[in-house]
Image (spheres, coloured by chain):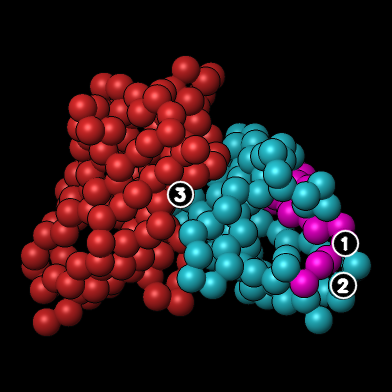
Amino acid sequence: QSALTQPPSASGSPGQPVTISCTGTSSDVGGYNYVSWYQQHPGKAPKLMIYEVTKRPSGVPDRFSGSKSGNTASLTVSGLQAEDEADYYCSSYAGSNNVVFGGGTKLTVL
Amino acid sequence: QVQLVQSGAEVKKPGASMNVSCKASGYTFTSCYIHWVRQAPGQGLEWMGIINPIGGSTSYAQKLQGRVTMTRDTSTSTVYMELSSLKSEDTAVYYCARGPNYYESSGYRKPNFDYWGQGTLVTVSS
């Protein structure tokens, strides 16, 4: 399985919205509603932010939201805060009991 | 509270094997899948495989087939991941992560990793 495609970087000013895309194929992102997003700060383990495309775990701020259209999933942060600066990874079920991650996006808060 | 505690850092020579453990607590060990994910220095996340703690069935990433083995010990709530024939490219931080409940519909398909171990750095160097 090939990694999902994410932009290497994204940025925005505090309070502004930013969207990160995650493009796959009909065999992964487009074929299942099993897309998750993870936030990772330097030296830390990833943290689940969105699961099953749009669901938010308890404790995750509601400024984080997920969506999907065709083979592309998206993570939107509606009002950037300084602590949102981190790496973000998407992941998807890819069939045949496999999971695939995206290459990651470094989000910078300007 | 749910915790996944991994074994400590290792240094291995090329061709050797590594074995990382992941001890679960704070929930019923057999109720949730466990996944392994690794991250090479400065690189992204790579899924390695999944183990069903109830029956011990596994599924591995195609890239690692033949070199990776995941097992579990229900008496100690511990999952083990062994990677053999190590290469320098296997240098990475290895994470275990809890997946969905085994009884959840299509749980094995969902990359919903809600708790992660602290990570184990394995360095492969001659």
Quarter containing the C terminus of chain A: bottom right
Cα gap from disc 2 to disc 3, whole angstroms: 29 Å
Rendered view: A102 above or below B78: below
Cα gap from disc 2 to disc 1, whole angstroms: 7 Å
Q: Amino acid at mark 1?
A: Gly
**SS category of the residue bearing label 2:** loop
Q: Residue at x 68, y 75 (%)?
A: A9
Provide residue B104's location: percent of width, then percent of height.
52, 20
Q: Amino acid at mark 3?
A: Trp
Q: Which residue is mark 1?
A: A79
Colour chain B appears in = red
- How busy is the neighbourhood of tag 1: few (under 14 within 10 Å), some, or many (20 plus)? some
- Residue B5 seen anywhere in this rendered image of the structure: yes
Rendered view: A74 above or below A95: below
Q: Which residue is mark 3?
A: B116
- Residue A98 seen anywhere in this rendered image of the structure: no
Provide residue A40's location: percent of width, then percent of height.
57, 63
Provide residue B113's location: percent of width, then percent of height.
51, 43
Which residue is situated farthest in the front direction here?
B1
Left or right: where does residue B16 sit relative to residue A12? left
